[in-house]
Image (cartoon, helix red, strand yellow):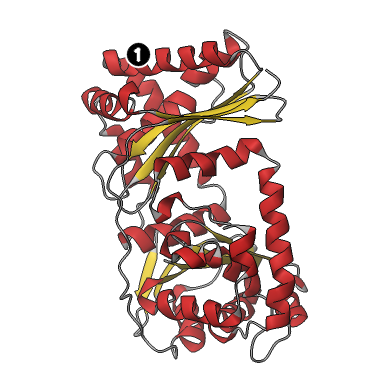
Amino acid sequence: MQYQFHALSNGIRIVHRHSDRLVGHLAVMLNAGSRDELPEEEGLAHFIEHVIFKGTGKRKVHQVLGRLENIGADLNAYTTKEETCIHASFLSTHYTRAIELFADILFNSTFPEKEIDKEKDVVIDEINAYKDSPSELIFDEFEEMLFTGHPLGKSILGTPAKVRKFNRKRILSFISNHYHTDQIVISSVGNISFTRLVKLIDVAFGQITASRRKIERETFGENQPQTLIKQRRNFQTHCIIGNHAYGYAHEKRTALALLTNMLGGPAMNSRLSMALRERNGLSYNIESVYTPYVEAGSFMIYLGTDNGALEKAISLVYKELDKFRDKALGTMQLHTAKQQFIGQIAISFESNLNDTLSMAKSVLVYDTVDTHEVLISKINAITASQLLDVAIDVLDPDKMSMLVYKNNKS
C-alpha cells in the first residue's frame, strides 16, 4: 500500500491512498475529544458532533444532510475521548461535493439555538438508551473508576444535567479553544489522483486561518486499584477486570496488542473463550480490550455470565492470566499467535472506510502511517521475553481493578 502525504500552508495535513473501487471515503479528524472538556463542559465535544450538521451560513439543516445523502452517500460522525471525526462514503466522482460540504460544516456552522434545544433531547435519549445496555455502560464506568479524578475517566456522552446547560456561546468557545488547523487531518481512500485531491482540499480548506494548539491536556499519573460491585436488575452478571496500560508512544504497545488478542480477541479459540465458553460453558460473551491514549491506556477483560457463576468465571480468568505471567511462550505458540494477529489485521485492511479512519488517526498521533509490511515486521519482531515482561507488568493481579454489575436477585 502506498500512502501519500501533504500539508497545507495553514497546517492541515492530508493523507491519501489510491483505490480503483467505485466508492471513495473521506474523513476529517480533529484532535479534540471529551478529555479536553472543562468540568462544566462534560459531553460537549460529543454534543457538537451532533449539532454541527444543523445548518451553516449558506445551508439549512435539510440542505446539509441532503447534500451527500441525495446522491446515495453515507454521512456520519463520531467522538472519542481524544478526537472528533466527520466521515463520508460516496461514489468517487463526488469528491468535490464531499470536500466542500465538510469545510462548510466545520468552519461555517451557525448552531441555531432552536436546533441546539431540540438536539438536547436527542442526546439525553441517547444517554438513557446507553444506560439500558449494561454490557456497554460497564466499559465507561470501569474507565471512570480506572481514571478517577481525570478527564479520561469521564463519559463521552456527559450527563443529562450538563447537556441541558449547553448553549451556542459555550459551543463556540470550545471550538475556538480546540479546533486548530495544526490538529486537523483529512484522510482519503478512493479513485482520485493525489494532485487533484490536494487542489480540491486547498480550495475548500486552504483559506482557513492557521491556528496552533495552545491548551495543554492534563496528563494522567496513576490511581490505586479498586473493586466495586453494583446491584442492578440485569438478567446476567456483568464484570470487567482490568488495569492501566501503555500510551501510543510506548515501546511495548504492539506487544500488549498481541497479548490482548491472544487472551480475548475476536477469534473463537482465544485463551479466555476456550477456558470460559468452550470448556466450561460459563460465558457467551468474553473479550479483552486494549485502548491506548496519548500518555496512558486501559486494558480490560469483559465477561457476562449467569448469576451465581461469577466466582468461578473470575477464577478461570486469573488462571489464564497466570499462565502468561509464569512462563514465556514456546516458539510455535508465539508463531501461531503472530500469524493469527497478522491475518486479522490484513482482513481489517479490506475495509477502505476502516483504513481511511485508521490513516487519519495514525497521522494525528504519529504524523505517518505504517504500511501493512511495516506492521507485520513490528509484530514479527516481538519476542517471547518481551511478551512475558508485558504480562508480568499489565496482568499483575495486585494491580487489577474490578467492576461488577450484579443481579440484585442473585
**Quadrant of the frame with the C terminus:** top right
In the image, is 42 to the left or to the right of 242? right
In the image, is 403 to the left or to the right of 338? right
Percent coordinates x, y for residue 211 in the rendering? 35, 83
Residue at x 55%, y 83% (from the top left corner): 169
Q: Answer yes or no: is residue 308 visible.
A: yes
Q: Which of 334 and 225 is in front in this view?
A: 225
Quadrant of the image occupied by residue 93:
bottom right
Q: Which residue lies furthest to the top in this view?
A: 279
Percent coordinates x, y for residue 384 in the rendering? 25, 23
Quadrant of the image occupied by residue 246:
top left
Percent coordinates x, y for residue 330 in the rendering? 29, 14
Establish if 372 lies above or below 241: below
Residue at x 57%, y 38% (from the top left corner): 138
Quadrant of the image occupied by residue 259:
top left
Establish if 271 lies above or below 218: above
Q: Which of 321 and 369 is in front in this view?
A: 321
Near mark 1 (Cα within 10 A), the count class, few <14, some 14-19 or many ≥20, is few
Is disc 1 placed on a helix, strand or loop? helix
Q: Which of 32 and 38 is in front in this view?
A: 38
- For disc 1, the marked residue is 323
Percent coordinates x, y for residue 12 in the rendering? 39, 77
Q: Which of 356 and 262 is in front in this view?
A: 262
Establish if 237 lies above or below 130: above
Establish if 217 lies above or below 232: below
Q: Answer yes or no: is residue 190 visible.
A: no
**Quadrant of the frame with the N terminus:** bottom left
In the image, is 57 to the left or to the right of 369? right
Q: Disc 1 marks which amino acid?
A: Lys
Residue at x 64%, y 86% (from the top left corner): 56
